[in-house]
Image (cartoon, rainbow, N blue to C red):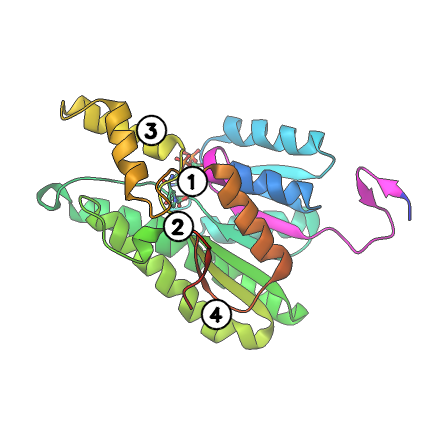
Amino acid sequence: MREHGGWMADAPPRPVTVVTGSSRGIGAAIAEALARAGHRLVLTARDGAGLEAVAARLRELGTEAIAVAADLRTPGAAESVIARATAEFGAPDVVISNAGTAPADKIEKTTDAVLRETFELHVGAPLAFARAAAPAMKARGSGCLLHLASTAGLRGFPFTAAYTAAKHGMVGLARALRAELAPAGIAVYALCPGFVDTAITRQAAAAVAARGRSTADEAFARMAAQNRIGRMHTPAEVAAAAAELVARRPDGCVYDLDRDVPGFVD
Ligand SMILES: NC(=O)c1ccc[n+]([C@@H]2O[C@H](COP(=O)([O-])OP(=O)(O)OC[C@H]3O[C@@H](n4cnc5c(N)ncnc54)[C@H](OP(=O)(O)O)[C@@H]3O)[C@@H](O)[C@H]2O)c1
């Protein structure tokens, strides 16, 4: 076989993979792990410059990568991203629904607007991506949809009513999609890490510090202590788990990473 940009020229075509929320954090780490595994990447988030920087890094690894800036709470955004991916590389083989925000407040301050926006991003966007990507996956008889969920999709955490409810919705959506799409050859996963050291957790710790309750470092340490593994996950270990599920497509749906021995809940 001939090597071409790190990929064998007469090997099967590289999978086409969309990663949402890939301008930084866990999404960028997953995109890099999949680039190293030979995927062609379609990156999407709102921050076009951040996406371009990640895409440039992936191209340096020898793969193809494009950036499609979009606010995924906008109706039609997922369909536009899938259309752009299809025009550039062909219909996506894999969609990683990772984009998210993590609003945190006590229940008295959790507004309907926050709840609605959180559900739009964590449930509405993955549903729209599944709706747009599934027809080509069904026609091919293979595909993979992976939701970056959370242990907040498996159990309750204080001061996160909107986020915890939305992550339970994201996990439930994965279960429903798997029940519907597995017979067509499409694997569906909800990957559930505990707290991960990214901008979301750093901002949450800073917000606690701003309210004067403790330092940001103390707040960060308290979050890490809520993980059953007793420490923060790293974006790289979440990305490695996602890449493993995408590559092996094991039987199962909801994967709890916050355990000494990570594994499927169901
Ligand atoms: N960090 C944790 O402790 C943790 C734990 C469990 C699960 N998770 C989940 O992991 C995922 C990634 O989180 P992270 O920690 O990597 O956070 P992060 O560093 O803040 O990254 C979030 C990503 O989502 C994108 N995004 C946010 N709102 C968007 C919108 N309206 N439209 C399109 N893209 C949007 C952001 O890009 P733009 O701002 O450029 O749009 C960014 O690329 C989230 O679903 C989160 O719930 C995180």
Camera-nearest residue between 70 and 12: 12
Q: In the rendered structure, are the residues bearing label 4 and label 2 in contact, judged by CB atoms less than 8 Å apart?
A: no
| Residue 183 sits in quarter | bottom right
Label 2 near ligand 1 (CB < 8 Å): no
Mark 3 lies on residue? 202
Q: In the rendered structure, are the residues bearing label 2 and label 1 in contact, judged by CB atoms less than 8 Å apart?
A: yes
Q: Which residue is found at the position 58% from the left and 41% from the top?
A: 31
Q: Which badge, 1 or 4, is on the more N-terminal residue? A: 4
Mark 2 lies on residue? 258
Position of 187 compared to 46: left or right?
A: right
Quadrant of the drawing holding the C terminus:
bottom left
Residue 233 numbered tag: 1
Q: Which residue is found at the position 63% from the left and 45% from the top?
A: 34
Residue 184 point in image, percent of width and height: 58, 74
Q: In the rendered structure, are the residues bearing label 1 and label 3 in contact, judged by CB atoms less than 8 Å apart?
A: no
Q: Amino acid at mark 1?
A: His
Mark 4 lies on residue? 178
- The stretch in magenta equals 3-27
Q: Which badge, 1 or 3, is on the more N-terminal residue? A: 3
Q: Nearer the viewer, mark 2 or mark 3?
A: 2
Q: In the rendered structure, are the residues bearing label 1 and label 4 in contact, judged by CB atoms less than 8 Å apart?
A: no
